[in-house]
Amino acid sequence: MLKKIRQARQEQELDITSFMSLMIVLVPVLLMMMVFSHITILELKLPSDIDEISAAPNDELKNLELLVGDKDMALYYPQGALLKTIPATDDGQLNYPLLVQALKEVKYLLNEKGIEKKDINLLLPPATDYQTIVTVMDSVRSYKAVVAASVVDAELFPDVSLSDAPEDLLAAVNAVEAAQ
C-alpha cells in the first residue's frame, strides 16, 4: 500500500504594511479636513404670533428694533420710538463699530433699569443683500471683549428676529438721509 505523504502546510503571513502606510497618511489628512469643514448655524426666531402678542403683558411688547437702511441704521425702543440713529461711515458704508457701541450702551441702560433683554428685531428692506444681513446679525449678537488677558465674545442680543421694514419708517429714514 502506498501511503500518501502529506506535506505540512505553512501558515500564510498577512502583509499589512501597505495598509498601515495608507492609514498613517490618511488619518491625519482626514482629521485636518474636519477642522476646515466647520459648519456654522445661524438661529433665527420668527415674528411672534398675533395671539401671543395680545395675551402678553405690556412690558413684553417693548421690543428693541434695528432698522437697517441703505446707508444709515436706526435703533427703536420701545417699538416705533427712535432711540438712536447710526450714521454711515465717510465712505458711505454701514457703520458696524458704531452700531456695536450703541447696542452696548442700550444693553447697559436696560440692565440698569432691571430689564433683561436678549432679543432684537431686525427691520430690513426687501432689497437688502445677504452679506449685509449676516454682518448685522453678527454685530447685534455679540462683540469682542478682553477678559483676563484673553479675547472672548460678550453677549449683546443673541435672539435675532427678521422682518420687513415698514414703509413709513423707511420713508422717515430716507428723509433724514436726504436732509443731511
Image (tube, rainbow, N blue to C red):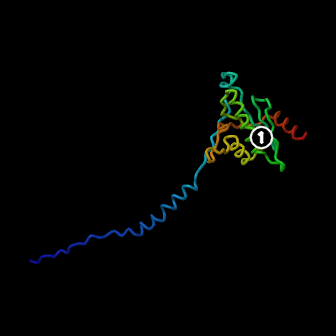
| Quarter of the view holding residue 48 | top right
Q: In the image shown, does 8 or 121 lie closer to the viewer?
A: 121
Query: Left of 30 or right of it: where is 93?
Result: right
- Say if 90 sits above or below 163 in the image: below
Residue for badge 1:
68
Q: Position of residue 111 (x, y in %)?
A: 68, 30
Query: Left of 149 or right of it: where is 162?
Result: right
The residue positioned 80% from the left and 35% from the top of the image is: 84
Q: Residue furthest front?
A: 148
- Say if 14 sits above or below 51 in the image: below
Q: Position of residue 124 (x, y in %)?
A: 75, 39
- Say if 97 sits above or below 22 in the image: above
Q: Quadrant of the N terminus?
A: bottom left
Residue type for callout 1: Val
Q: Position of residue 119 (x, y in %)?
A: 67, 34
The residue positioned 44% from the left and 68% from the top of the image is: 21
